[in-house]
Amino acid sequence: MILGAALGLTATGAVAAGPPPQADLTGTWSNAWYTQLQRPKEFKALIATPEEAEAYEAPRRALNGMIVAKDDVLGQEEAEFNDMGPGLARIRGEIRSSWITEPADGRIPWREDVKTALRIGQPRVEAYDHVEQRPSDERCLTARGAGAPILNSPDTNFIQVVQTADHVVIVSEKNHDARIVRLGAAIGPVAPGGWMGASVGRWEGATLVVTTQGFRPGLTRTNGYTVSDKTRVTERFTRTGPREITYLFEVEDPTLYTQVWRGEMVFRKEEAAMYEYACHEGNYALPSILAGARQAEQAAATAAAGTATAK
């Protein structure tokens, strides 16, 4: 302890700069909750009542947080291993219906022209003409726990944080993506193109503040929103208990959103090890997905030809 204290002193006797002891974020954490980014229609406010929470959680417990969708004709939700935690998130004793805290409606504040262009709120149109039309998560390129802001998904919600004097690394369980945060680096112009952008950080007392920009233009994220090369995300990590990190984030991009939108989440400490999640769809599934689309097109053409001949 004496040696450690001596190493922390400069030549003038002042304590060297660095995060305070309570700012240790190192470890494995989980953000597995039923709560998602945007507020479901079942809730009218950010803070849910115990009765509202029970009505929402009860039908989802059998599938560990998921519910069978009407269009799930193949039973995907029932066949996969879901792990969405103990229920809706509890933050400072409040039951949260969404991560978004601002705007007050708990929804992403899309610009109207962007909503039209991206078909927000409309049935999804699938495209199979070439590989890059498929979602980035389907191609094993992005994951909700890897980028900024860090979000949760139906499974693989572990996050591992590793700290050094000049870097913080955030490792996502899914796809084992590692986001490297450079501490003390200047926030300057960033060449766009990174799947997770470029992150720099600084300590404000016991809070790690991370700014991320330089995303790929037009990247459609797996967590329900789109970023561009103009997007800027600010995150704040604060150790608020021996087994808890409070996580705040804000997203700004005037080309996509009508205002800055903000959210709050909590990470729970996990003692279990984080194992490799080997995403293989990009290697094996994509050729089959595109081949299946060609077969469907051929079948439709054959049927159309048969109908024309019959007439």
Image (spheres, rainbow, N blue to C red):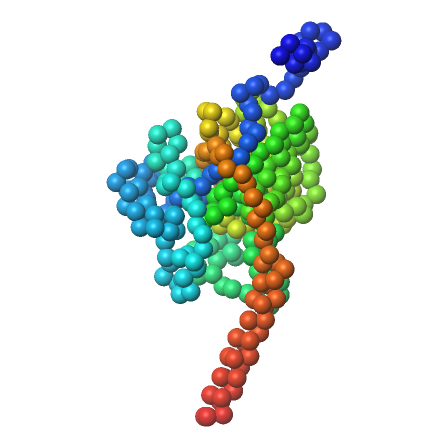
Query: Does 74 appear above or below 100?
Result: below
Which residue lies most toward the left here? Answer: 51
Q: Residue at x 56, y 25 (%)?
A: 24
State the residue in front, 105 or 236.
236
Q: Position of residue 64 (x, y in %)?
A: 39, 48
Residue 113 appears left or right of 189: left
Residue 121 appears left or right of 150: left
Q: Let me know if residue 250 appears in the view.
A: no
Quadrant of the frame with the C terminus: bottom left
Query: Does 233 appear above or below 283?
Result: above
- Residue 76, quarter of picture: bottom left
State the residue in front, 244 or 98.
244
Q: Position of residue 20 (x, y in %)?
A: 57, 18
Q: Residue at x 25, y 40 (%)?
A: 51
Which residue lies most toward the right here? Answer: 11
Which residue lies most toward the front here? Answer: 272
Q: Residue at x 46, y 24 (%)?
A: 241
Quadrant of the frame with the N terminus: top right
Q: Position of residue 279 (x, y in %)?
A: 58, 53
Query: Does 69 appear above or below 272?
Result: below
Q: Residue at x 41, y 62 (%)?
A: 75
Which residue lies most toward the top here? Answer: 13
